[in-house]
Image (cartoon, coloured by chain):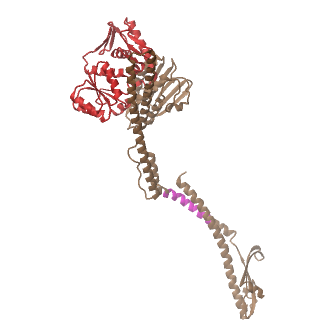
Chain colours: A red, B brown
Amino acid sequence: MKILLVEDHLELSKSIASYLTQEHYLCEVATTFDEAREKLILFTYDCVLLDIMLPDGNGINLLKLLRKDGVESSVIIISAQNALDFKLTGLSEGADDYITKPFPLPELHARIKAIMRRRNPHKNNVLTFLDLTADLESMECRVQGRLLHLTRKETNLLLYFINNKGRMLTRQAIAAHLWGDYTDNLDSVDFVYQHVKNLRKKITDAGGTDYISTVYGLGYKLNAAE
Amino acid sequence: MKLNYRYTIAYAVITLFVLSVGFAIVYGAMSRSVTQSTIGKLQHLNDIIAAQLASGRDYTGHPARANVRIGRASTADTARQAQLVQVRQEWEPSLQASVSVVRLTTYPRIRGLRYDITSKAVVVMPSDEYLTGIVLVFAWTFVFLLALVVILSEVISWYILKPFNAILQGIERFELSQKTTIALQPSRTMEFNVLNDFLMKMTSRAQSDYQGLKEFSENASHELQTPIASMKAKIELLMDSELTEKQLLMLTAMHDELERLAKINQSLTLLAKLEHFESAPAPLTDLSQLVLSTEAAFADLAEMKGLRTTQHIAPGVLVPLDESLARLLLNNLFSNAIRHNLSSGEIHVVLSATELLLENTGQQPSAPVSELFGRFKKGNAALDSIGIGLAIVKRISELYSHRIEYTYAAGWHRIRVVFAPPA
């Protein structure tokens, strides 16, 4: 899957690109409006990660140009504007999603996956991790074929784990993913513990193996090795 | 006190003073002129007596001689002066009263001989009835003048101060965030025009300063978010490498601090944005729906803390409020109600057509509740919160003229938002 990252902050773009490469994406980086424009004319990307404030132009204008030129790539806006700016001014019009800086990298990954799935609804509808499966259509999760009775948040949590398997997820990243706009609560991270605990219990109760490990009490990891 | 009242009072005091002085002058002048005219009459009489003496005939029984004494003068007297006037208070038997008596002595030379002729006349000085009359005249003049001043000052000041009142209204309506300059009309009065010019300059400068500050604060916080995002990303990448527990703990601490920094920055930007937010005529938002969905979104958090939530939501409550802002307001209120609650505490939510009431159990705040609307004010220093949520809530309420109150009593925190009537 090919991704174009349009971000003028060099270090941030390096980090994002390196993370996405680890997740087996093909990630190219453009640091200016013109460079991004050129790349988008020459090549086809599945997804464009677009910063709004570019040194030589505005990302929103680039987005408008893209849509006018009939470029079909999904677009996720990466911006320092907060969520309210998007809602009040309709900044994200024409984009598939937006994510505000700073964001946990796994969150970006989850958003990209979600968008890709929306684009290809019939492809790859079942997420699998060893004997865990999650049907994204019916939102049913199974362990060794047995149905798990999960709440919506727990389902969401399991999907997040499977999407970021083998990677440590901090409590903040999980909180941000589960509660999104609602997590102005810095202490909502304490609730993450509860949700993870419940999820693990439901999996083991259903006879599955608990692949989720606690990383020194700092975060969690879905890992086959444990 | 209104300007024209002050003027009227000052004018009344001045009038009273001037009239009093005028009265004194009139009184003095009248007294003097009465004496002077008597002296004039006596001079005339003395001239007649002198003429009689010069004629050499005998006028002893003549009525002119009734109040006249004629004698021979010594040269010493004539050397002193041509005439002598004496005004004295004397008992007058013919009037049976003590009156002023004017005596005039002249020293004519008649056929080589010097005489002294002293005539006298009784003068009624304008002391008693005169005085009352004059005082009445002045008093009535004063009353009439005052009445006229009071009435006219209303009319004239309305007319003259019209541009000034327009300026006042212009200032009242003026907002720093408005795009246009302050609306002031030119006047025919020089001072008002000077004031206009001054206000124009002041406000346009304040506006440009404000605009600059606004842009700066927006840009600064945006510029901050990107480096924070970069640092966080690097820490996350580092966390996935092989590290010792100690290193991981330090990284996590850094990560948490960055998270906090980002949140503070975000909240401040949001607050700044709301300060400058120009609320267009507000669309009506269905608060019943929103309260229910917000409650549902927080249900799991409340449940995990063992909180019992009761709600009485009137259906179809439409309130002038932007929907995104309403969501933000409710999020902040609910998350506060959960965060600052006791374990196994309670939350009551009551939404009626006129107000939203959110009550929750909780510890007594360490600061007075009215201060909790300020930035970085926390009722409980132990909790890991930023302390901007309520400031945001207050600002959103103010934007749409909803009244917000926060009280604490007997273990219950109560936040009441009284909706402004729809325009």
Note whether B46 is above or below A173 in the view shown. Answer: below
Q: Residue at x 38, y 23 (%)?
A: B234
Going by the image, does B284 lie left or right of B60?
left
Going by the image, does B381 lie left or right of A152?
right
Note whether A89 is above or below B121 in the view shown. Answer: above
- The image position of residue B139, as x and y in percent, is 62, 63
- The image position of residue A113, as x and y in percent, is 30, 20
Q: Say if the magenta span includes residue B152.
A: yes
Q: Identify which residue, A113 or B101, lies in the foreground.
A: A113
Q: Identify which residue, B263 or B102, lies in the foreground.
A: B263
Residue B41, image quadrant: bottom right
Going by the image, does A147 lie left or right of B44?
left
Note whether A156 is above or below B58 in the view shown. Answer: above
- The image position of residue B29, as x and y in percent, is 65, 72
Q: Say if the magenta span includes residue B91.
A: no
Q: Residue furthest top?
A: A207
> Main structural element of the magenta stretch: helix, strand or loop?
helix
Q: Identify which residue, A220 or B177, lies in the foreground.
A: A220
Question: Can residue B144 be spotted in the picture?
Answer: yes
- The image position of residue B51, as x and y in percent, is 70, 91
Highlighted range, magenta? B136-156
